[in-house]
Image (cartoon, rainbow, N blue to C red):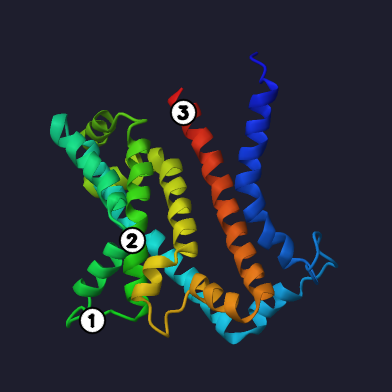
Amino acid sequence: MHRLSAFQVLLLILLVAFVVVPIAMPVIFSFSLFWQDILPEGFTLRWYQKILAKPATSRSLGVSLIVATSAVLLNLLIAVPAGYAISRLHGRFRRFMTTVARVLPLVLPPVIVGTALLLAFSKPPFAFSGTIWMVIVAHTLLGFPFMIRNTLASFDTIDVDTLSEAAASLGANLWQRLRYVIVPNVLPGVLAGALLVFAISIGEFEVTSMVAGFEAQTLPLQLFQQIRNDMRIASAISAFLVYVSLVCFLGMTWLGGYLRERRA
């Protein structure tokens, strides 16, 4: 087994500190009474209680959960059939469609995505600007490339053509093949994509700030306001978002390991 040199260990420690320390700061502050010197003082859960006690903050938490859940469900309805359709393609056209689905939405700056959504949904009959529906559409679009990436990776672990032909030979239609044969085989990857979409949606700020109105204030928008009003409540909100991301990361890691074992 290759042993790391002292220099490599130092670089690894610096890298971990560079990533972990900034994220740990709001978590530590969220449990502290005061933090004026180098180390925080006291322990309290008061700032978490105030998140639920403040009507605006508790309401924004509910909006974030509704938006994130809706974005996941819409991505499931769109990405799984799209991944199945792309997996049935062959040759250069499949590579082209795979590249478009995975890369194109990621190379567009969020400000362009937000502007495009405002232009597309600002006039009847699709005048959704400033509503929670607009935020759901935005988060669904932002999460789609991540969902389709995981879905396509899952389809690559199975022989879609053989399974579909075998099910069709037994009389299964397209819906039955998807529901009873294909989806159960790709479910771990789909769930990993769903967790990633949820984590992205629950913490999304830039595009949300462009398309959300006063009645669709999500938790990150409330966090931005609390930074100017009360940094202690802001730290509790930030810590909560860290917890959600960490849970989603652990879930994706476990599902990724499961997929690798199946592929092996």
Identify the residue position indicated by label 1 in the image.
127
Among numbered discs 3 and 1, the one appearing first in the sequence: 1
Q: Residue at x 51, y 40 (%)?
A: 255
Q: Quadrant of residue 7?
A: top right
Q: Please, what is the three-letter code of the amino acid marked with disc 3? A: Arg
Label whose residue precedes the other's in the sequence (1 or 2): 2
- Point out the residue furthest to the right here: 42
Residue 264 at x, y percent in the picture: 46, 22
The mark that comes first in sequence, 2 or 3, is 2
Question: Which amino acid type corresponds to the residue marked 1 in the rendered image?
Answer: Ala
Residue type at the position of mark 2: Pro
Query: Of 172 and 263, which appears nearest the observer?
Result: 263
Give coordinates of residue 115: x percent, y percent.
Answer: 26, 69
Using the image, determine if residue 44 lies above or below residue 147: below
* 255 sits to left or right of 113: right
Q: Left of 65 or right of it: where is 229?
A: right
Q: Is residue 194 visible?
A: yes
Q: CA distance from mark 2 to mark 3?
A: 36 Å
Q: Residue at x 45, y 57 (%)?
A: 200
The CA distance from mark 1 to mark 2 is: 21 Å
The image quarter containing residue 71 is bottom left
Q: Which residue is mark 3?
A: 262
Where does residue 156 sit, x and y in percent of width and height? 33, 32
Between 62 and 184, the one nearer to me in the picture: 62
Q: Which mark is residue 110?
A: 2
Where disc 2 sits, the SS reads: helix
At x 41%, y 46%, the residue is 190
Which type of secondary structure does the marked residue at label 3 adopt? helix
Residue drawn at the location 68% of the way across and 28% of the way down: 9
Q: Of the residues tagged 3 and 1, which is closer to the observer?
A: 1
- Helix or strand or loop: what does disc 1 sit on? loop
Figure quadrant of the N terminus: top right
